Image (cartoon, coloured by chain):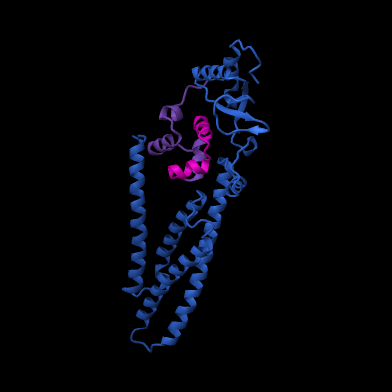
């Protein structure tokens, strides 16, 4: 008999799955290393485990990229990709050096050959790790920008203008998207009446004071230029009906 | 369902999504997705958002019946 898991059960299951993932991941790494070191196995003999390890790692990485998980950020992408690529290459090269030394024990040791092999492999691994990390971060950043475009009002142009010290927002900046102007009031009485009527119906609204040639961002009492009231587009009809039921002395509704 | 109340409260507070994200220690995309109704925040995050916008949980997250 199947039963739906509740929120707590799902979260605990997720936690257990995370621990399980790391147990499997590290278990595979240890298994590969033990076979290579202690059992003198060839690289072909550990190919199966290595493929599973790589596939598991790739699943996590691709999942992260698809969710737009950034680890380094744009500014540090190059530097950090180089740094972590270097660390990865160092660890891999140390392990490779130990394996090759084990294999050559008791044979005519060619130290120079070993050093050259390790140096070349280090550079190759560093380059590959760097390219992989850099591409991963670039792909994640691209996904982040896509999420920005889909869900965020604060697009890059706005950020650039903020960085330049221009923080004034206008209707064109997109923060009134999804809102529609329903009324313009000319005094405190009209404004308070609109607010009370909308509050009574629990209709959310945004109040914006007008200024000559534009809008003031903050509501700070009555304005000689009038005050605009904006409501969500989907609630416009309901709000209009409520406001229209009041006998206004002047034209308030938009 | 879009969270228009949260968006209005944020605009009234003169905050951008980026600024709210910094205060609540999440990413800008997370705030955008909450407002777009694409992500259900945890109670902890809801409270952080309410504190940042000086609103109650009811005011921002209690869904009224469809009109």
Q: Quadrant of the N terminus of chain A?
A: top left
* Residue furthest front as drawn: A224
At horizontal 52% and vertical 63% (from top left) the residue drawn is: A132
Q: Is residue A44 above or below residue A210?
A: below
Q: Quadrant of the C terminus of chain A?
A: top right
Colour of chain A in the image: blue
Magenta segment, prevailing SS (helix, strand or loop):
helix
* Residue furthest top as drawn: A247
Say if the magenta span includes residue A203: no
- What range of the chain is rendered magenta? B1-26
Considering depth in this image, is A199 or A235 the residue closer to the camera? A199
Q: Is residue A27 left or right of residue B50?
A: left
Considering depth in this image, is A135 or A182 the residue closer to the camera? A182
Position of residue A2 measured from the top left corner of the image (x, y, whole percent): 35, 35
Position of residue A109 measured from the top left corner of the image (x, y, whole percent): 38, 88
Q: Which chain is purple?
A: B
Considering depth in this image, is A149 or A40 the residue closer to the camera? A149
Position of residue B37 measured from the top left corner of the image (x, y, whole percent): 50, 35
Say if the magenta span includes residue B10: yes
Position of residue A44 measured from the top left corner of the image (x, y, whole percent): 43, 71
Q: Is residue B30 above or below residue A43?
A: above
Q: Is residue A77 left or right of residue A37?
A: right
* Residue furthest bottom as drawn: A108
Considering depth in this image, is A161 or B30 the residue closer to the camera? A161
């Amino acid at each position: 008999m199947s039963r739906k898991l509740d929120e707590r059960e799902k979260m605990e299951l997720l936690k257990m799955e995370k621990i399980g993932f790391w147990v499997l991941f590290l278990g595979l790494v240890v298994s590969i290393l033990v076979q290579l070191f202690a059992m003198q196995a060839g690289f072909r003999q550990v190919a199966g485990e290595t493929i599973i390890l790589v596939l598991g790692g790739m699943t996590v990485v691709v999942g992260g990229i698809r969710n737009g998980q950034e680890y380094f950020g744009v500014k540090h992408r190059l530097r950090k990709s180089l740094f972590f690529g270097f660390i990865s290459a160092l660890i891999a090269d140390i392990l490779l050096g130990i394996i090759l030394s084990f294999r050559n024990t008791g044979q005519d040791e060619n130290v120079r050959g070993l050093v050259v092999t390790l140096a070349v492999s280090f550079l190759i691994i560093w380059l590959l790790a760097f390219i992989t990390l850099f591409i991963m971060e670039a792909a994640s950043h691209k996904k982040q920008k896509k999420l920005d475009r889909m869900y965020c009002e604060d697009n890059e142009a706005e950020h650039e203008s903020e960085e330049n010290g221009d923080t004034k927002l206008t209707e064109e900046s997109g923060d009134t998207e999804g809102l529609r102007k329903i009324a313009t009031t000319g005094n405190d009485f009209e404004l308070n009446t609109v607010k009370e009527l909308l509050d009574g119906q629990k209709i959310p609204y945004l109040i914006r004071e007008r200024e000559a040639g534009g809008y003031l961002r903050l509501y700070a009492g009555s304005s000689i230029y009038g005050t605009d009231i904006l409501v969500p587009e989907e609630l416009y009809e309901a709000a209009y009906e409520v406001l229209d039921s009041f006998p206004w002395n002047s034209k308030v509704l938009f | 369902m879009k969270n228009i109340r949260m968006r209005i409260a944020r605009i009234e507070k003169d905050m951008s999504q980026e600024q709210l994200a910094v205060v609540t220690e999440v990413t800008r995309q997370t705030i955008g997705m909450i407002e777009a109704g694409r992500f259900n925040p945890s109670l902890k995050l809801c409270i952080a958002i309410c504190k940042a916008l000086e609103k109650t949980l009811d005011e921002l997250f209690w869904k009224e019946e469809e009109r």
